């Protein structure tokens, strides 16, 4: 288990106690999650907030932070001889505590006593909105509240305190994220070089996993490897690749410390880009570059999304797929026929960083109201950018036949969308180009080594 220096975790916990200011904080670690019976489990993944403050990637842990005494307690059990027989020698809970600068450790069961004392003394008890059912049950049990209350009575001040720290990455975190991005880049390079007509999408997907796990980490999310790139989160891998197909690969690794990378490339199978593929690809690439140039502290990411959408719309207007004033195409949301999702998201210990803490609390600020407009409503990150934020930029063009049919029947945006021209491309698919950036004082910095992105570089890398 790789960890930062214990001082890092001590400092983070002290800051959290100070920010939340009063009461006691409960942070639950994740347990193993069974696939089909108890001992046959999914790959283990610790909760990211627990990892951030307590560093330990291990099932069966919980922790409290007392905001008034500033004391952290780690709860967990020493391994029994039965466990050692099956899983080998393990560190004691004291040794685990020492690794992360926690002096006070207790058995898992004793968290019940500590919480009961806090309840008796009428102290505020802060906990997060749980996303796993066993955590819901544990919280309900610990606090003697209903399942419904365990899901809903989370602490907004705890969420704010966590976001306050996790939003801006330290130098040691950025180095770790960059490792994740570089592994992700290697995954993509391997995919580009291997994909050939006659292979299946799953052949490429398994190569991605091979590269990710060879560094001791794992996927940062289930990969998208598809010739139907217009389906935004398509996890089906059973199609056979044909010459001339466009393959969209959206995939990333997380390092063994849990930090994510997330990249997307789209490339032709077995031959160079066709002229029309080139046209669409270059439009996405231009939007990507325009967005990257706009990244800097102080700009709202919502505006970067709109700048990219404008560039996309200009390109699509040149192709005669959109018509009218580009500003109006963007303002009315007509462009979302082609770009239905957000331009990017925060990234860190989660590939969509802190998504479990609520989009409004993470990607937005209290004064920002999330748009209800189709397209813009899917923007996960909107807030003002600050030095130290890590985010993705991932514009795309997605031609979705059912969306064409629906809007065309409703005569929606008829003044902006050239439906008769669009019909010619209804089976085109989708293109996305995604890279990861850290916001710096001067603008932004690309994370990880560059991998092929221009038409020429992609064509020189793929198997033809
Ligand atoms: Mn992404």
Image (cartoon, grey):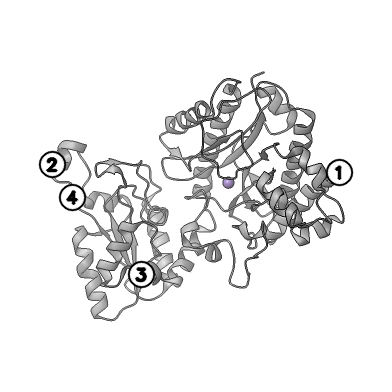
Inter-mark Cα distance, 1 to 2: 69 Å
Question: Are dots 1 and 3 in contact, CB under 8 Å?
Answer: no
> Which element carries disc 3, helix, strand or loop?
helix
- Which residue is denoted by mark 2 in the rendering? 82
Label 3, ligand 1: CB separation under 8 Å: no
Mark 2, Cα crowd under 10 Å, few <14 / some 14-19 / many 20+, is few
Residue 281 in percent (x, y) is at 74, 37
- Which residue is denoted by mark 3 in the rendering? 148
> Which element carries disc 2, helix, strand or loop?
helix
- Which residue is denoted by mark 1 in the rendering? 318
Label 1, ligand 1: CB separation under 8 Å: no
Judge by depth and name the residue closer to the eye, 302 or 424: 424
Q: Nearer the viewer, mark 1 or mark 2?
A: 1
- Which residue is denoted by mark 4 in the rendering? 78
Does residue 164 appear to the left or right of 285 in the view shown?
left
Mark 1 vs mark 3: which is more N-terminal?
A: 3
Instruction: Report how many numbered discs are placed on residues in the image.
Output: 4
- Mark linked to residue 69: none
Mark 3, Cα crowd under 10 Å, few <14 / some 14-19 / many 20+, is few
Judge by depth and name the residue closer to the eye, 52 or 395: 395
Picture quadrant where residue 106 is located: bottom left
Residue 34 in percent (x, y) is at 30, 45
Q: Nearer the viewer, mark 4 or mark 3?
A: 3
In this view, 113 is above or below 395 = below
Inter-mark Cα distance, 4 to 2: 11 Å
In this view, 140 is above or below 176 = below
Label 2, ligand 1: CB separation under 8 Å: no
User: Which quadrant does the N terminus fall into?
Assistant: top left
> Which element carries disc 1, helix, strand or loop?
helix
């Amino acid at each position: 288990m790789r960890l930062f220096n214990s001082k890092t975790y001590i400092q983070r916990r002290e800051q959290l106690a100070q920010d939340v200011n009063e009461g006691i904080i409960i942070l639950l670690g994740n347990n193993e999650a069974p696939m089909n019976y108890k001992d046959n489990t999914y790959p283990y993944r610790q909760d990211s907030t627990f990892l951030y403050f307590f560093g330990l990637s291990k099932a069966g842990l919980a922790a409290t932070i007392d905001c008034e005494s500033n004391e952290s307690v780690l709860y967990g059990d020493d391994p029994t001889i039965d466990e050692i027989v099956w899983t080998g020698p393990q560190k004691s809970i004291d040794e685990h505590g020492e690794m992360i600068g926690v002096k006070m450790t207790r058995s898992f069961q004793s968290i019940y006593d500590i919480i009961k004392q806090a309840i008796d003394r009428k102290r505020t008890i802060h906990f997060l909105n749980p996303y796993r059912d066993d955590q819901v049950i544990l919280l309900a049990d610990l606090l003697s509240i209903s399942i419904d209350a365990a899901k809903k009575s989370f602490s907004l001040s705890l969420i704010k305190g966590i976001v306050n720290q996790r939003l801006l990455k330290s130098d040691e975190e950025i180095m770790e994220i960059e490792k994740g991005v570089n592994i992700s880049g290697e995954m993509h390079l391997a995919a580009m070089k291997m994909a050939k007509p006659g292979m299946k999408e799953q052949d490429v997907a398994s190569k991605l996993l091979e590269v990710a796990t060879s560094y001791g980490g794992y996927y940062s999310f289930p990969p998208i490897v598809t010739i139907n790139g217009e389906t935004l989160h398509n996890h089906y891998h059973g199609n056979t690749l044909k010459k001339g197909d466009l393959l969209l690969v959206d995939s990333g690794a997380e390092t063994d410390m849990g930090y994510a990378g997330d990249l997307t490339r789209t490339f032709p199978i077995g031959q160079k880009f066709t002229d029309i593929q080139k046209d669409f690809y270059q439009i996405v690439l231009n939007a990507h570059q325009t967005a990257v140039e706009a990244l800097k502290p102080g700009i709202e990411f919502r505006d970067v999304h709109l700048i990219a959408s404008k560039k996309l719309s200009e390109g699509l207007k040149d192709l005669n797929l959109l018509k009218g004033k580009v500003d109006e195409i963007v303002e009315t949301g007509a462009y979302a026929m082609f770009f239905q999702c957000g331009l990017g998201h925060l990234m860190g210990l989660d590939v969509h960083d802190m998504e479990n803490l609520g989009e409004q609390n993470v990607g937005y600020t209290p004064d920002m109201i999330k748009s209800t407009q189709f397209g813009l409503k899917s923007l996960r990150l909107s807030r003002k950018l600050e030095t130290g934020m890590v985010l993705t930029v991932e514009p795309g063009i997605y031609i979705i036949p059912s969306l064409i049919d629906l809007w065309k029947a409703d005569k929606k945006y008829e003044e902006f969308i050239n439906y008769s021209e669009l019909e010619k491309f209804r089976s085109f698919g989708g293109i996305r180009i995604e890279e990861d950036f850290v916001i710096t004082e001067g603008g932004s910095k690309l994370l990880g080594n560059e991998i092929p992105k221009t038409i020429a570089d992609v064509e020189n890398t793929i198997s033809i």
